[in-house]
Image (spheres, helix red, strand yellow):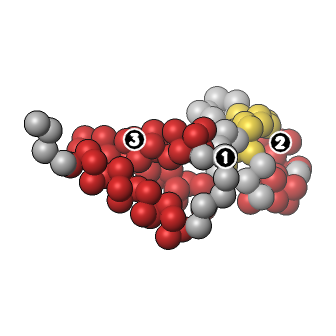
Amino acid sequence: MIPVATSYASYTQARDNFVKVLEQVEQGDAIVVVQRRGHGDVAMIAAEELSSLLEQVYLMRSPANAQRLLGALEWSEQQLQTTPESLSIPELRAQLEAELGQEEAPQE
């Protein structure tokens, strides 16, 4: 996930600039935390970003699935570092299948 800046605003600031705050959040530029006197803070986050976060939490609940996802992320980061040229989707698929086949082959 790409880090998102967090802004803080008082209730009065948020109320007085409500449309501007909504647009800032909607564009994904920031998460706005509204601080209220005598109450807990409330965060405003774009619905799309919230949906993405909830999906990630759901997928990571299973330890086996989390391990697979983290392994795939690690593999993709290695590929970005070792593959300077652009590859097509079929070329990437073939490369991944070849690597997976090597991992699954019985070791002698």
Please state which of the two labelled residues, at mark 3 or mark 2, is closer to the viewer.
3
For disc 2, the marked residue is 12
The quadrant in which residue 50 appears is bottom right
| Residue 68 x/y as whole percent | 32, 46
For badge 2, the amino acid type reads Thr
For badge 3, the amino acid type reads Leu
Crowding at mark 3 (Cα within 10 Å: few <14, some 14-19, many 20+): few
For badge 1, the amino acid type reads Pro
Identify the residue shown where x is 44% and y is 57%: 95
Q: In this view, does 43 lie to the left or right of 102?
A: right
Q: Which mark is residue 70?
A: 3
Observer-nearest of 48 and 38: 48
Crowding at mark 2 (Cα within 10 Å: few <14, some 14-19, many 20+): few
Identify the residue shown where x is 78% and y is 49%: 29
For disc 1, the marked residue is 84
Observer-nearest of 37 and 19: 19
In this rendering, does residue 77 appear at all? no
Q: Considering only order in the chain, which callout, 2 or 3, is on the residue closer to the N terminus?
A: 2
Q: Is residue 9 left or right of residue 45?
A: right
Q: In this view, does 95 lie to the left or right of 35?
A: left
The answer for how far apart the CA atoms under marks 3 and 2 are is 42 Å
Crowding at mark 1 (Cα within 10 Å: few <14, some 14-19, many 20+): few
| Residue 67 x/y as whole percent | 31, 41
